[in-house]
Image (cartoon, helix red, strand yellow):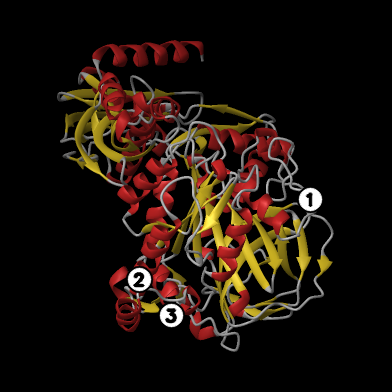
Amino acid sequence: MPSPSSPSTQSSSSPGIAAIRTLALVGPAGAGKTSLLEALLLQAGSIAQAGSVERGTTISDYDPLERKLQHSLHTALVHIDHGGIRIHAIDTPGAADFIGQSLPALEAADTAVVLINAQNGIEMMASKMMETAAQRGLCRLIVINKIDALELDLPALLEQLREVFGRQCLPLNLPAAGGSRVLDCFYNITGRADFSSVGIAHQALVEQVVEVDAAFVERYLNEGDIDPRELHGPLEQALREGHLIPVCFTSARSGAGVAELLDVIERLLPNPAEGNPPQFLRATGAGEAEPANQRMQARPDPSAHVLAHVFKVVSDPYLGKMGVLRVHQGTLTRNSQLFVGHGRKPFRVGHLFMLQGNRHIEVEQALPGDLCAIAKVEELHYDAVLHDAPEDEHIFLKPLGFPVPVHGLAISPARHGDEQRLWEILGRLVDEDPCLKLEHSGQTNETVVYGLGELHLRMLLERLRESYKFEVLTQPPRVAYRETISTAAEGHYRHKKQSGGAGQFGEVYLRVEPLARGAGFEFVDAVKGGTIPAQYMPAVEKGVRSALESGVVAGFALVDLRVTVFDGKHHSVDSKEIAFVTAGRRALIAAVREARPLLLEPMVQIEISSPATAIGDITGDLAARRGQVNGTSSAVPGTLIVQGLAPLAELSSYQTRLNAMTSGQGRYTLLLSHYEVLPPNTQAQLIAAYKTADEQD
């Protein structure tokens, strides 16, 4: 991450909560979120000149990688002070690979501002954000951007929005003069729009708003119209209940509709007391099981005790770990004593920052609805609830549903001895992104990092190189195949070693038998007459287990077999544990080679979310990968979910192929199902490769 500018003290006092607006700009890549935010900053007088994504001069895309790619990779915060209103806005990435950055922004906002690219129509990320915002109880505002582009069909797009997201999607304004400006339809009843009618749009808005209040319905029926300035209360109720989803038109490039959008944010969008309360839960059971959790309502009251939620963590090379948070209740000040979740030891807030891109502006306090940051507190982590009352230790925010990271990459340091440092750096990066996962596989002895796609992991590698100056080696993670047997067989080995003094002696006879798939391993001691004394039997089992772990024919763990030791010999002087470890291992290897060994491959349940238009390509591609389709279902409007079964080995770099089939809009999750026998030709290749490597060693 780039270094922040030196913190500066904010002299102006915080506005009251009635003057706070907190919103997240979400939607697909290329919709113009960052550019629209620049246009709003310019319109409000916060900046003298709008930055450009192409030139890398915007406030929110300050990371060198973002400037290089000309796309947002992280959430960024800006604030706008205008007309006595403070607007906290969160700019979010639009690429599906970075949804782990985008979704948490919805936990911090009262309103989700969902951008639609007028040229592309409704894309999958817009649908996902509309759905998640509704589930979280956020007010929603749709902004159709790029209305000055050529060959648009805006009436058809507006109708499509209403078909997909509901008839409650109504325009607050309409394009006019060929998309060079917009006309307000809420306070205004006349004007010539490019399509539809300002008067008709005004009537539809008023009717939709008054429907939530019986008294206003009666007035409207009697009087025919109501002054919109009287409808603030019903309007906020309609937004809270999802009874109204306003639609605005803008062009961030030309500035059309930007002033009107700023006015909508200030006059119509909810303050923290008008939006739906956050979905806090209080754990009442020991295991925090869902049935034991009780809803807990945070009050946007500055005089109450503090409740704040960390929705973003940044490992800053200058400020250390920094937690970015939303205050939901109480007043957070410098020198506040706060607890982190269940933590028993409080920490003191040394500095409180408001963020403006990569600038850290020091402030004295933060009220409910404010977004701020606290630095140099190692205990902070994503999803932490900060509080100043010990009795609030069991409060947490209802978890978000993140996609499961399944795109794996085995990673190792380029320089031997840097393994620990690599693990520490990767741990910091994983802390910042809920959709990154770090594992060390004991079966393959690899460190594997999982993300949502090739781009996701490529950016992680770029950060390792650019921010931490750390070089790594990467390769696809090894598939954890298994070995097993298909018939019973016996094995025998005599270990005898004499080297002058006391020798080593141990002899083992054993039998192997196949078990049902998934049964694991059984060890049976059937020795009679003390031919192998009881004190040596653990050593025999240790040798057997050693062979199971390392494999026999292809170097993969042996599973689903019973090993019965039924005879052997010992020597009263030379028998030792090490001799029986070796004899047990060698006897097992001999038996397995006679038991018609097989190789098993992991089969995974795959669930693919995709635009409906790509389903044919996806099912055909899955069949070509030895997979099968078990069913399809409908999810977000315009998308389908395919459930299937496929070999894990056939899904290497699957996200890249899925991106090609779905124009980057497809996602998938995997869940281990069971193991099946590999095709004979693949078994032969793996066994031959293992023999070659074994001979070279």
Q: Residue at x 47, y 73 (%)?
A: 228
Say left or right for 372 vs 363.
left
In x, y percent, where is residue 567? 20, 32
CA gap, disc 1 and disc 3: 38 Å
In the image, residue 76 above or below residue 679: below
Q: Residues within 10 Å of mark 1 (few under 14, many from 20)?
A: few
Question: Eyeballing the image, is 401 above or below 666?
Answer: below
Residue 466 position in % (x across, y down): 73, 37
Disc on res. 287? 2
Query: How far across and down, in percent of the image, does residue 38 sit?
Result: 68, 50
Please tell me whether mark 3 sits on a helix, a strand or a loop.
Answer: loop
Whether residue 673 is visible = no
- As drawn, the residue found furthest toward the bottom would be 303
Classify mark 2: helix, strand or loop. loop
Image-quadrant location for residue 589: top left
Q: Which mark is residue 623?
A: none
Left or right, residue 654 beside residue 438: left
The secondary structure type at the circle numbered 1 is: loop
Query: Marks 1 and 2: in contact by CB < 8 Å?
Result: no
Name the residue nearer the viewer: 282 or 216.
216
The amino acid at mark 1 is: Ser
Residue at 60 percent of width and 33 percent of height? 412
Q: Which residue, given by chain and number where applicable, does mark 1 sit on? A: 3
| Marks 2 and 1, the one that precedes in the sequence | 1
Q: Amino acid at mark 2?
A: Gly
> Marks 2 and 1, how far apart in space?
41 Å
Q: Sequence order check: which comes first, mark 1 or mark 3?
A: 1
* Residue 297 numbered tag: 3
Mark 3 crowd level (few <14, some 14–19, many ≥20, 10 Å Cα): some
**Front label number (2 vs 1):** 1
Q: Could you tell me if the residues under marks 2 and 3 are in contact, i.e. CB atoms within 8 Å?
A: no
